[in-house]
Image (tube, helix red, strand yellow):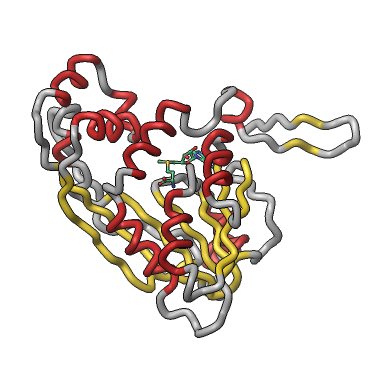
Amino acid sequence: MRHNFDLAREGYLNLLPVQHKHSSEPGDNKSMLYARRAFLEAGYYEPMAKAVAMMVAVGRPQGQAMRLLDVGCGEGYYDRQIHAYCGQSVQIELHGADIAKAAVAAAAKKLPSARYIVASSKRLPYADQYFDTLLRVFAPSDEGELKRLLQPSGRLLIVTPGPRHLAQLKAFIYSEVREHAEEIVLPQGFERLDTQRISYRIKPDRAARAALLQMTPFAWRTNPAIRQALDEPEELDIETDFILTLAIKTAKDHTLEQKTAC
Ligand SMILES: C[S@@+](CC[C@H](N)C(=O)[O-])C[C@H]1O[C@@H](n2cnc3c(N)ncnc32)[C@H](O)[C@@H]1O
């Protein structure tokens, strides 16, 4: 595989990921960001967000501060929920990173006590083992970076769509709706501590349905006919289905074991 790096005059390497080079607006574009903002702030995912907040805080030793990074944080909706639900009982140093500048700017404005950066999840500019908790909600990440950034026995919480997630919305787009897997494959070097499945129904109005469509990857597959069909029903009952997977970083590095095995 060929890699091209920009060697700066001063002699350092700019290891800019490919998507930085080919897009003036890396990550989610503004219409996706605005759609996600409108939908999340209307509270449709609040039960899941509460569960996320509880899950990052539960089982922590009394009085121990938490240093948490939200990888692919978007506009920091889940960070604000964590701050609101756990901020009184746990001392939290909240960090968020996302490749979309507009999202990070909005996150920072809404939660000034947190620290946000524009960065790719493939190269996160933090010291090794800087965090004890990592959060990844519907966002891409890099296995090596997750492992590098977490302290030994640090915890990783991943939120992914469950099998029935948005099934009724998907039915407008796909002739055959394929279900997501119920269990995710954890990155090497992590062991599952707990899995919670949070499922409930929502009844988004027309504007919220349009926002939901726009904030998901389904947006790329829609056309005016689909949008019109989705706009027709006065009420639409939609299933949400989230898998929350809490894992611990184990002392053993299976990747190294595999590399050295012969
Ligand atoms: C589906 S959104 C989820 C945002 C947020 N976690 C939430 O649930 O509200 C995915 C996010 O990942 C970000 N993203 C995509 N590629 C990324 C990358 N390589 N590095 C960092 N963030 C990335 C996008 O900009 C977007 O904000």
**Can residue 32 be spotted in the picture?**
yes
Quarter of the image with the N terminus in it: top right
The one nearer the camera, 100 or 22, is 100
Q: Residue furthest top?
A: 224
Q: Position of residue 146 (x, y in %)?
A: 55, 58
Residue 126, picture quadrant: bottom right
Find the residue positioned furthest to the bottom: 62
| Placement of 143 over or under 228, stated as above or below | below
Image-based side of 87 in relation to 9, left or right: left
Give the percent coordinates (x, y) of residue 229: 13, 21
Residue toward you, 155 or 108:
108
What residue is rendered at 30% in x and 32% in y? Answer: 211
Quarter of the figure with the C terminus: bottom right
Q: Nearer the viewer, residue 63 or 188?
A: 63
136 relative to 69 in the view: left or right: left
Task: Say which residue appears at 27% left-offset and 47% top-offset.
Answer: 44
Q: Residue at image x 34%, y 71%?
A: 194
* x then y, percent, for residue 130: 65, 65
**From the viewer's perspective, is residue 226 above or below residue 14?**
above
Q: Residue at x 55, y 43 (%)?
A: 98
